[in-house]
Amino acid sequence: MTHATTPAFVGTRSTGARFWANNKATLIGCGILVALMIVVPFTASSSVMNIVVFAMIFALPAIGLNLLMGLAGQVSLGQAAFFAIGAYTHAIMLTKLDLPGPVAATIGVLAAMLVALLVGLPLMRLRGHYLALATLGLGFIVMIGVREWDVTGRTTGIYGISRPTVFGIPIDNSGFFLWFVTPFVVIGLILALNLTHSRAGRALSAVNDSELAAESLGVNTYALRLKVFVLSAGFAGLGGVFYAYQVAIVSPTTAEFHLSVSILLMVVIGGLGSVWGAVAGAFLVQFLGEGMRDVIPAIFPGATGEVQLLGYGIVLILVILLLPGGLYQAATTLWHKLPFAGKRPPGDAHAHTPGSASELDTTIPQLPLVSTPVAAGEPILVIEGLTKRYGGVVAVNDVSLTVPAGSILGLIGPNGAGKTTCFNMISGALTPSAGTVTFLGQVISGRKPHVAAAHGLTRTFQNLQVFTSTDVVGNVYMGRYRKGRAGVLRGMLGLQSAEQSGHRAASYEILQSMRLTDAADDSASDLSFGKQRIMEVCRALAAEPALLLLDEPMAGLSGAEREVMAELLRRLRTAGLTIVLVEHDVAQVMSLADHVAVLDDGVLIAHGDPESVRNDPAVVVAYLGTDLDEAEAELTELEEHA
Amino acid sequence: MLTDFLQLTVAGLSQGSVYALLAVGLIAVYTVRHVINIAQGEFAMLAGLGSAWLVAAGMPLLLGVLVAILTVTLVAIAMERLIIARVKKLTPLTSIILTLGVSTLLQAIMLLAWGPEAKGVPLFPGTNVLIGGVSIRSQEFWMIGALVIVGGGIVLFYEKSRWGKALRACAEQPVAARIVGISPVTASILAFAIAGFVGGVAGVVASPIYLSLWSGGVLLGLKGFVAAVLGGFVSFRAAIVGALLLGMIEAYVAGYVSSGLRDGAAFLILILVLVVRPQGLVLKPTAVRV
Amino acid sequence: MKKSRLRFIAPIAVVTALALAGCSTSNLGGTADADPAAEAGPIKIGAVLDVTGVGASLGVPEQNTLTMLAKQLNADGGIDGRDVELTIIDNQSTEDGAAKATSKLIESDQVDLIIGASRTGPSLAMRPIAEAAKIPMISVAANVAIVEGSEWVFKTAQNDVVVLERILDDAEAKGYTKLALVRDATGFGEGVAEYITELGAERGITLVMTEAFEPSATDFTPQMTNVRGSDADAVIIWGINPSAGLAQKAYVQLSVNKPVYHSHGISNQAFFDAAGEAANGVVAPMGRLLVADQLAADNSQREVIEQFKADYNEAYGEQPSGFAGHAFDAWHIAVNAIEAAGTDAAALRDELEQAEFTGVSGVFAMTPENHSGLDASALILAEAEDGRWNLLKD
């Protein structure tokens, strides 16, 4: 998936060809699915038919849950709740209000989404375990609610739902019903696939890898997660609508925990993050369940009830232990082992690179764009009284600083001086205990990192925050997030390929400026430590920032790499970019920075041009913790050494 | 009216004792492994059904109960060794799916072994007491007593004994714990053993009046989770208070509002607490306390 | 990567699928085999029962009974020489399960008649499906809502109204004026409070409080505490076992100390299993099955009940419950009607509407207006004592 067609090739093709190239897998896959679904009613026995129908119905909530779990990394144990809300609303609209089917169905889906929105607003602030258990609680609440409410028919539920009629044909047998449900599953599938490849989808998987980094690049994780949660509920609601039609009754069982578990199992078996996997998982779980119901009583005489749970439990454990990527992982691994696999189709990502590597050494790479809306020398970042307390410990104490546009500020200090804490408060990763950070006239302190990023402030991290699930160019591409506009809806409809190819081209250019083009298609986690650091800088630059915060950008870099980096930073400054960097390499800082600020024990002890800071006796003592002469000698030595 | 209120309070306290024991088990595992064990409730049901079966097969009550608790403790340790310990990097996602898998598997095993009907251990020895119109069943004394002895014992273990302190340290600082003399592996096994043990105790004392059912564990475990959340998921004492509170609230809702809404109340509290005060009602969000 | 893989698979899949495509159209509403109404081949009877789940204490003896009777019938040569094919599906005591099972019986098994379900909720879920397909259905559950206004649905369990009349008559005779109701929260208990209010009005009896419990409940303290605090003279516990038995146990443990009536939903051994000693003194209306040995010698039902008990005991080594009796009656009413009218659905329905049968649960007289066929005479009052039922009043 990551080797989508590169811009160079796109330009030479017609729109139709481009559409085909970009969507080949989806189109072929859907074609096969549709073909199978057309044929199945003619060939399958009635019990297989029954399984297939329910697999298609449950594929919908499974696709939804897969988006939520695979893409947004949020576990929901209450998917059945939204399934039930869709089913109940649909049933009530049909039987009590006598609304036409399409209207009732639409209201059913919307009801599920509305409830998801209402509960998601507070719940999406939760993380990991807490969200999972809150959704589990939600599932129980919905079940109890429908059981106790007269409108939902209490324990008996709502029955007497008549079968739908399409173009005057009553859908009164399972064959017709399969044909009735298939188009909806296919459309849902395409929308979900588009979403995973869209700007929002990439952002979500980035959030999964590193929430901090993604937010620093402008991703509003909360809003995005909420949108996916609502979307996922919509899929579940649609599944519920079809379930109500097919079973002709909606009872509290539709909200049961075991149903949520089986939907979760579909996603896990299929492979987290793989939309096709969710569909395959739905079929597998239905067949597994039916199979277990036949096999278990044969092995254990007298076994009755939900014996298929035995298989569900074992499969859940085994998949996570042995095959965390599910069927999708198994299929891709198998594919790579085939003799004719492994050759990338022509026209893929590598195609554009030949020659570029050798050119690099001779030509001066193009400089990434920067966007500084204020004139050089004007204050771009104003820090006032910034303080962070942890219990009784003061990590940063009343720091005030002003950074003029178009300059480089070096922030130095001994270990534990509070440099990174300062950075975190500026970028929004930490909320200050007191004080404000004003960036381009906007107070950004105490807001989430994506707010600062939206105004043009990006950063790198001391502890690298690499998006490990994608390649190098994918990481840099994420930096372009701020420059894109396509939202969840446009992403689902696939209306952003032009925008995407533009960003991809820009990503390659930035990699080129740091001579990283050769590694562009390597997995980000395979890079050396130094290269990862450079990649992070590229990623931050891809956002075309006005202010760049670099947390120890030189750490782990080779001498040559440091030179490239330093040169790039200088050129960026000339181009108008403002840079604040924390760095251990004092010599490097002194030679690069226009201004240097020194933190010691959370207190700003010096701030000025490199020359005056270097000669500030307080700095020398504090920084090196020894007496003045010795410290100065050491400092000089360090510089010469570098 | 007062009699009714007190009657409901007694029912709430005895039910709350069961939630409290489960909450203790959940916290023990969470502090060490950062895993929320969805199978915690199944430990209780397994012990209840197991001892009911042993006693029905002719084993003396006391022996049957002890064997069942011990077996469940071993099951919990096996779960840790065979499943949890095998995953190198436990994320919330994988840990939830894994413990959910164990929970589902245990349910299925109970269903296959003992059938779909609810079963109860015979009543423990004792007599029902009627004080001022409030009837206290002898088993309710056992339930509250189990919390006092076992729950109290675990709290003391964590606060007084060397190993208990090491377990606490393990939660806060794995390196420090090693210095005290407990490896993360031992700590993890110990935590699961505690979870299995308290789950087993909760299961057998509750079984005579609340009965044990193959599918009843999820709901019960969730109630324990609600209690643990009320205690901020770090403090045993706070969780025990939270559990007793939860038991009483449930009883009042069932008595004064509608019995059908009883479970709804618990989960409404859960969601409210998670949203309003995820650090728990009782403690401030500081480091792990036990 | 995936793209080219799919390119290989696609043609293979399509070709395989097309090769497989035969001419079977049974999934599309066509009929693969003979016309179901045809007067040849085996007669197909489907049953949807609560074999597992909360209704298991009802569904299992019903399943046993139907299996036994089908075997007997086929051993005796079937109906007019045609074998009877009985398909029993477990609905797991859920409404969804009942609805799915009914659709399956109608669409793929193409049955001529459906028996079930064991409880009211699942029966209500099945009703519209049977009606839409115009297939006769005989429920073995109690609530009158199952058959009210239906053309195609019949039932063999005594109506809840009739049972309540019996209880209220007894309460009136004993001078109770205020009743409390603790009822099953599912379909079986729905409408009971309204009937008590309505039927009680003419007898000077008022319903002072209603509490509900889930059939899966194990704790009844809140309900019983409230009942104890009420000023009711007597209490009706309306449910099926094991929950009704457990409720009775809690009732005694919490010293409610008021006379208690149960419904006919407890007429089985499971009640004594769940309630233990607490069962003593419970009064409940029920069919004559459990007190057959105490009936007058000339009672018209005595012979059929004793024959059924003997057969059941021989087949399964235990005594049948009242629910087994409902299944026995449903089976015989169905078989008698098929013998008379064949398997044409409309004719069969018309025949069922005039069915008369002396059965285990009572003497049936169906009419187009009354698809239940039993009146208050089908019930006796019995009192529990040491694990058995004593006939109080015939």
Image (spheres, coloured by chain):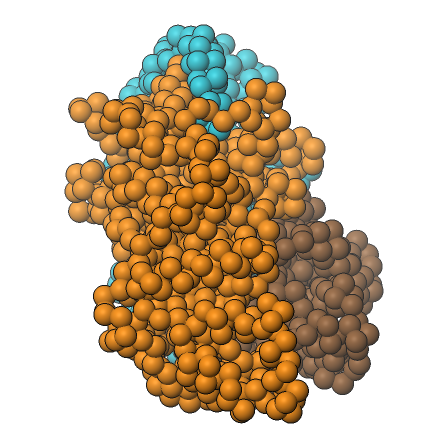
Chain colours: A orange, B brown, C cyan
Task: Give the image location of residue A250, x and y in percent.
Answer: 35, 44
Res A324 visible? yes
At x 44%, y 59%, the residue is A567
In the visual, does C194 lie left or right of A47?
left
In the figure, A482 relative to C371: above or below?
below
Q: Is residue A15 above or below residue B100?
A: above
Q: Position of residue B11 (x, y in %)?
A: 55, 76
Position of the N terminus of chain A, as image quadrant, is top left
**Residue C105 rendering spot, x and y as whole percentages:** 43, 26
In the image, C268 versus B147, the foreground residue is B147
Q: Residue at x 59, y 89 (%)?
A: A621
Q: How many marks?
A: 0
- Left/right placement of residue B29 relative to residue C43 reads right
Judged left or right of residue A519, residue A248 is: left
Query: Is A28 or C92 nearer to us in this picture?
Result: A28
Task: Classify C173 as above or below A179.
Answer: below
Q: Nearer the viewer, residue A336 or A94?
A: A336
Quadrant placement of the C terminus of chain A: bottom right
- Residue A256 position, x and y percent, is 45, 51
Residue A250 at least partly seen: no
